[in-house]
Image: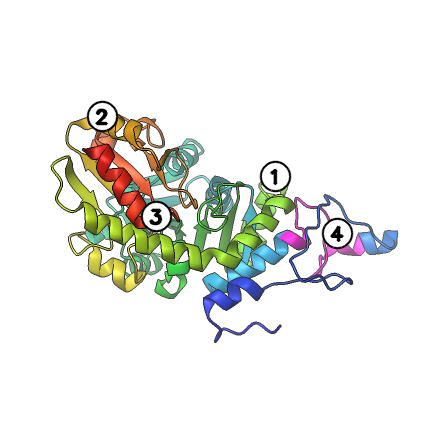
Amino acid sequence: MTDSPRQHKRTRAVHSGIRRSQYGEMAEALFMTQGFVYDSAAQAEARFEKVGADEFIYARYGNPTSRMFEDRIADLEGTEDAFATASGMAAVNGALMSLVAPGDKIVAARAMFGSCLYVLDILARFGVEVELVDGLDLDEWERALKGGAKAVFFESVSNPGLEVIDIAAVARLAHAAGALVICDNVFATPVFSRAVELGCDVVIYSSTKHIDGGGRALGGVICGTREFVREIAEPYLKHTGGAISPFNAWLMLNGLNTMELRVRAQADSALAIARALGPHDAISKLVYPGLPSHPQHDLAMSQMGSGGTMLAIELEGGKDAAFAMLDRLELISISNNLGDAKSIITHPATTTHQRLTPENKALLGITPGLVRLSVGLEHSDDLIADIRQALE
């Protein structure tokens, strides 16, 4: 099949990047091998000097199954190339670490996943200047970018507070300062992504989340220009061991087949839940970008066309109330993953963002009463009933 940009994303998510062996298999093949055989010593020498478009050396460098996943996600995201990694954090680490050197500057949004902040801390230890800003404040971005920077880094929708970054505005400021725009796009998902169109140069996903969608395996991917992916990120990742395993890449390929159907259904349920909970005596604040009450609702609709699959709910009564609610849930599971077919609830202050200081938690709105809900594929009526009985 010939890939076409005119085809719908759902079609490309099923067909793009397929490589078939001499057997003409219908399903994507799993090439479960770490090495490859050469016809001659001269061929091995030639391949190490220059790897062809459909040639492989070692699974840490590339594999036919991994390459199918990379080609397909790059096509969906609208980038020239992609490199699949062992996890989402391997992708974040690889994209940032491969780009910067001591003395370079990164400007990053303050509101993001705890492990992303940890990677920035490591870079600072190695002599990279890291400046954190309020991602919603364009004046702060502009001030921080005066004098230039190597890159800006942000989550397009922050974890767990669901702040929506104005990608186009930040990208304009970054490019004017000579900075590369690197976006962690997990909450937006490839289904609702317009990141490249809005000015992102590098787009990162934890494919562990919505791409796999079944809670089965770790994975990540860096999408960008061929120059960035193959000349900057790939050398670092292949030599430091950050590549995805062929089996996990095969799972991700199969996840892409159904991703749009799943994610749109999950987003529909998330909106139904947000509307149904509405004013509730036990809830002091409900944050969902798909609601008009969200401060960046219009921006979310223009950037994604959806509120996504995640909600943030702040409970009256703090940690005790949050824990009591979590413990009373019967259908929704307590876990720290997201984007799963099964609905998951998390208490960020004591789990995913536990390492942050109390001051930083307060600054980011991660209160003791805040819970993060990842909406799965269960019927929304059942999820609403479960939340209501846990609250009441």
Residue type pointed to by label 4: Phe
Q: Earlier in the sequence, mark 3 or mark 2?
A: 3
Chief secondary structure of the magenta portion: loop
Relative to residue 259, is residue 315 drawn left or right? left
Q: Secondary structure at mark 2?
A: helix
Q: Residues within 10 Å of mark 4 (few under 14, many from 20)?
A: few
Relative to residue 73, is residue 65 drawn left or right? right
Q: Which residue, given by chain and number where applicable, does mark 2 sit on?
A: 319
Residue type pointed to by label 3: Phe
The quarter in which the C terminus is drawn is: top left
Residue located at (26% from left, 42% from top): 385
Residue type pointed to by label 2: Lys
Q: Which residue, given by chain and number where applicable, does mark 4 sit on?
A: 48
Expressed as whole percent of the image width and height from the top left, the position of residue 340 reads: 43, 44
Which residues, given as a range, are shown in magenta? 45-65
Q: Earlier in the sequence, mark 2 or mark 1?
A: 1
Q: Nearer the viewer, mark 2 or mark 1?
A: 2
Q: Nearer the viewer, residue 138 or 128?
A: 138
Residues under labels 3 and 2: Cα distance?
28 Å
Residue type pointed to by label 1: Gly
Q: Earlier in the sequence, mark 3 or mark 4?
A: 4
Q: Which residue, given by chain and number where applicable, does mark 3 sit on?
A: 154
Q: Which residue, given by chain and number where applicable, does mark 1 sit on?
A: 241
Q: Nearer the viewer, residue 390 or 278?
A: 390
Expressed as whole percent of the image width and height from the top left, the position of residue 323 reads: 26, 26
Whether residues under marks 3 and 1 lie with C-beta atoms below 8 angstroms apart, the answer is no
Q: Earlier in the sequence, mark 4 or mark 2?
A: 4
What is the image's colouring? rainbow
Residues under labels 2 and 1: Cα distance?
39 Å
Q: Earlier in the sequence, mark 4 or mark 1?
A: 4
Q: Exactly how many numbered labels are in the figure? A: 4
